[in-house]
Amino acid sequence: MAAELQTWSGKKRFRYEFSRSTLDVRIFCGEGFSRIYQVEGQAIRAALRQFCGKETPAGTNRTNPPTGSIGDWFLVNWKRGGIISYLGPILIEEGYAKPGTDTDRIYINPFQS
């Protein structure tokens, strides 16, 4: 069963399925949740390692996220621009992150794996 959250901006809702064992995520968004994105656990694991214990800009812009943001990292390394609009709230909900000190920032909790 998919859980439902709001995107990073809070303007839209989406559903997701998350595997704690693999960190794989399936995101259902758009009209009737008909668009599906899949993010492999290895990408999420790599991001959690990269930003472990750090606060960073979220970087939700699909084509031009701020340099050094987690969104920029996903765009450069995994060709997934804008995915942090969904992954940010998922990581927070699942306990891997928390909101940063400003609305456009995210803190990635210490992570080992």
Image (cartoon, rainbow, N blue to C red):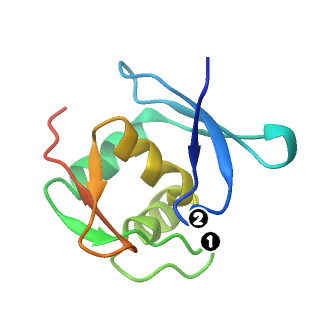
Residue type indicated by callout 2: Gly
Residue at which label 2 appears: 82
Residue 67 occupies quadrant? bottom left
Residue situated in front as seen by the camera: 94 or 56: 94
Judge left or right: residue 96 versus residue 7.
Answer: left
From where the camera sits, is residue 65 visible? yes
| Residue in the image at 68% along x and 56% along y | 12
SS for tag 1?
A: loop
Q: Is residue 100 above or below residue 25?
A: below
Judge left or right: residue 65 versus residue 98.
Answer: right
Residue situated in front as seen by the camera: 55 or 52: 55
| Residue in the image at 18% along x and 48% along y | 109
> What x and y, as percent, mark residue 110?
13, 46
| Residue in the image at 17% along x and 63% along y | 54
Judge left or right: residue 61 versus residue 96.
Answer: right
Residue type indicated by callout 1: Arg
Q: Quadrant of the C terminus?
A: top left
From where the camera sits, is residue 34 visible? no
